[in-house]
Image (cartoon, grey):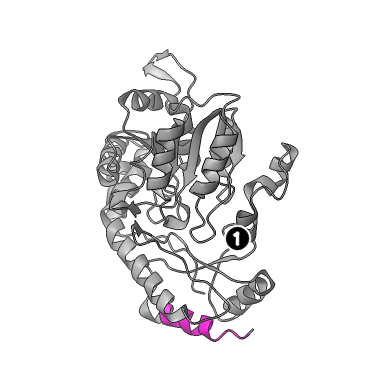
Amino acid sequence: MITVAYPIIGKKEKQLIKEVLDSRMLASGKYVVQFEQSFAKYSGAKFSIANANGTTALHTALLMCKIKPGDKVITTPFSFIATSNSILFCGAKPIFVDIDPKTFNINPVELEKTLKKERSIKAVLIVHLYGLPCDMDAILKLKKKYKFKLIEDSCQAHGAKFKNRKVGSFGDAAAFSFYATKNMMTAEGGITLTNDVKADKYGRQIINHGRKDHLTHTVLGYNYRLTNLAAAIGIAQLEQLEGWIEKRIENAQKYNEAFKELDFLQTPYVPKNCRHVFHQYTIRVPLSEREKIIKYLAKNGIGSGIYYDTVLYKQPFYKQLGYKAGLCKEAEKAASEVLSLPVHPSLSKADTDKIINVVKGYKR
């Protein structure tokens, strides 16, 4: 079976893990510091704070932006549930805004409509979904006009660029995930970026039990620290990330060319000013065909995935909070049509050729 994800673990990762094990310094330490510095430099942000996972990185980013109980935070409903859950962790209220059907990212036109209607918005949490940056020109223009805090959920977008500037460097804070299936990973892990020295100082307290020093705790904090073991993997992975991204882009372009004449699917849209890093290669297919296509692919040895089959506010817990269906029609339609194919850098030419031939052989 050609799987949708395939984590790469090489000699460098194993070497650094062995170094950590031999050092007996398994919790936070010099490898975490090195990883933080390297990832900040790579992403173009001034500061970075390593986290236990992408969800803690999001929660930390929101707290660094002083999101508190009762605040309203706009976000997209078409994402992994950690995006909106992190808002709830702060006691704040998610306000959902519809997506652009071409990019799957939050629609700036709909965002401004909501900003005009909801004048007390404290922050906007955008998601660079599947590895494609949001329209940052439009969003930064709105940020300047409406004075909200901007948080970037970059958990699927390591190395993605808008006008040659990497995501994670635009907002007041940003979060990345290093879960095992991401474009680079630490098995579990995350990182929070900022360009604000005060936010960085506060964030470091948040992830370490609120410590001012070893024995003094001055704010409410959490145990969100990354381990040296995880950071060691991240150091090795970051060194290889650019090569992996290029391979993902190469595979995606190959698919785009092969699939462009097929009438039963839409290939991913990539604006000219963006570098899409293809955490997922996500096509759109008719809802009436999707399950049939999934079974056909599986029968021919090809894995696939649906990310995501429902919008966040239609999840059972969010229904309990009072959210109703129909809030974001484009997001709901996308959830019924998206399907992701394998695009990871471990695919061989034989693998991508097989995927192309099988997809092109599908009969409606």
Q: Quadrant of residue 241?
A: bottom left
> Can residue 172 be seen at all in this image of the molecule?
yes
Q: For mark 1, does the 10 Å Cα neighbourhood hold few (<14), some (14 to 19), or many (20 or more) residues? A: many
- The amino acid beneath tag 1 is Ala
Residue 287 x %, y %: 66, 69
> Can residue 190 be seen at all in this image of the molecule?
no
Residue picked out by circle 1: 334
The residue under the point 52% across, 72% down is 266
Residue 347 x %, y %: 39, 72
Tell whether 312 sits left or right of 37: right
| Helix, strand or loop for disc 1 | helix
The residue under the point 49% across, 27% down is 222
Magenta stretch: give its range. 352-363
Q: Main secondary structure of the magenta part?
A: helix
Taking 298 as reference, is 143 above or below it? Answer: above
Residue 10 x %, y %: 31, 60
